[in-house]
Amino acid sequence: MKQKRIAVVGVLIAIVVLLSSCMSNKDLVRTIEVSATGEVTLAPDIASFSIQVSELGKTTSEAQNFANEKMAQLLSIMRKNGIEEKDIKTTMLNLRPSYQWIEGKQYLEGQVASQTLSVTLRKLENLGSLIDQLGEVSGIYLNSVMLDKEDKSIGLEEARQQAVQKALAKAELYARGAQMQVGKPITISEYSTASNPYNSRLKMAMASEAAYDMATEIPAGTMTVTSTVSMVLEMY
């Protein structure tokens, strides 16, 4: 019985060896994997930021009135600068008590009313002037000013085309070095990113008499979109 098993195993090994020897070079799939990045520079055309009002009052109603008054001023300024209602969104509304610690004891200081707006400005040339006007309202917070390109599709398409051409050129270079030729792609994967050139957090206050009178300038600069492509291609 043991001899029969050995004989069967020997036959199987012989078959495998025979099949391997019969396999021609054209039956083997040789591949090469390459990656490349395309990069395109764009000019921002919109700005987004959040603006917060937080007011303390003896009662919740008083705090709300203080906050509502400031928020009305901010909304009026933004509307005068052409910001549409669809680009102004409340992201936080908060009413809470405020406490102070004095000599190890907690005392109720009053009530706080807070409201935060998310804003998109589509006329980027008005950003500096808008910030100056918002700065006329004291004690507000201007958060996370981000410059962006509203439509990045053309830039991303160009970056992807660059990445593909660079990857194919790299594959051709490697194939020539190995005295082979590049065939069709087997798989293609891609990853895209876009950079934002500006981000800040500012507390806005009324300008004092000693402060110099100068308009705010915010250079828009540029932003970059990148596309990284990875490809697996046949080689023969």
Image (tube, rainbow, N blue to C red):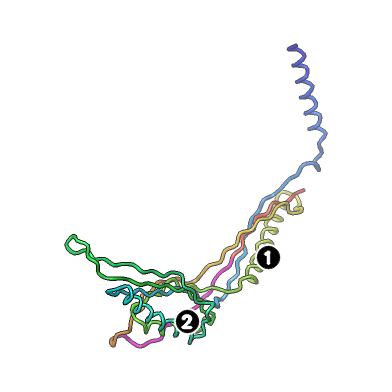
- Left or right of 184, for residue 67: left
How many numbered discs?
2
Give yes or no for residue 223 being in the magenta stretch.
yes
Q: Which of 15 and 129 is in front in this view?
A: 129
The dot on residue 161 is 1
Q: How crowded is mark 2: few (under 14 residues within 10 Å), some or many (20 or more)?
A: many
Quadrant where the N terminus sits is top right
Q: Which residue is drawn at 42% across and 81% down?
A: 74
- Of all residues shown, which one is farthest toward the left? 103
Label 1 vs label 2: CA separation? 34 Å
Mark 2 residue type: Leu
- Magenta residue span: 211-225
Magenta stretch secondary structure, dominant: loop
In the image, residue 118 lies at what x, y percent?
A: 47, 73
Q: Which type of secondary structure does the marked residue at label 2 adopt?
A: helix
* Quadrant of the rendered image containing residue 69: bottom left
**228 in relation to 93, above or below:** above
The dot on residue 221 is none
In the image, residue 203 lies at what x, y percent?
A: 36, 75
- Left or right of 179, for residue 89: left
Q: Which of 138 and 61 is in front in this view?
A: 61
In the image, residue 107 lies at what x, y percent?
A: 22, 65
- Please report whichever mark, 1 or 2, sits nearer to the chain's N-terminal start: 2
**99 in relation to 119, above or below:** above
* Quadrant of the rendered image containing residue 44: bottom right
Mark 1 residue type: Gln
* Quadrant of the rendered image containing residue 58: bottom left
Q: Which residue is drawn at 38% across and 69% down?
A: 94
Q: Do the residues labelled 1 and 2 touch (CB within 8 Å)?
A: no
In the image, residue 35 lies at what x, y percent?
A: 64, 56
Q: What residue is shown with label 2?
A: 127
Q: How crowded is mark 1: few (under 14 residues within 10 Å), some or many (20 or more)?
A: some
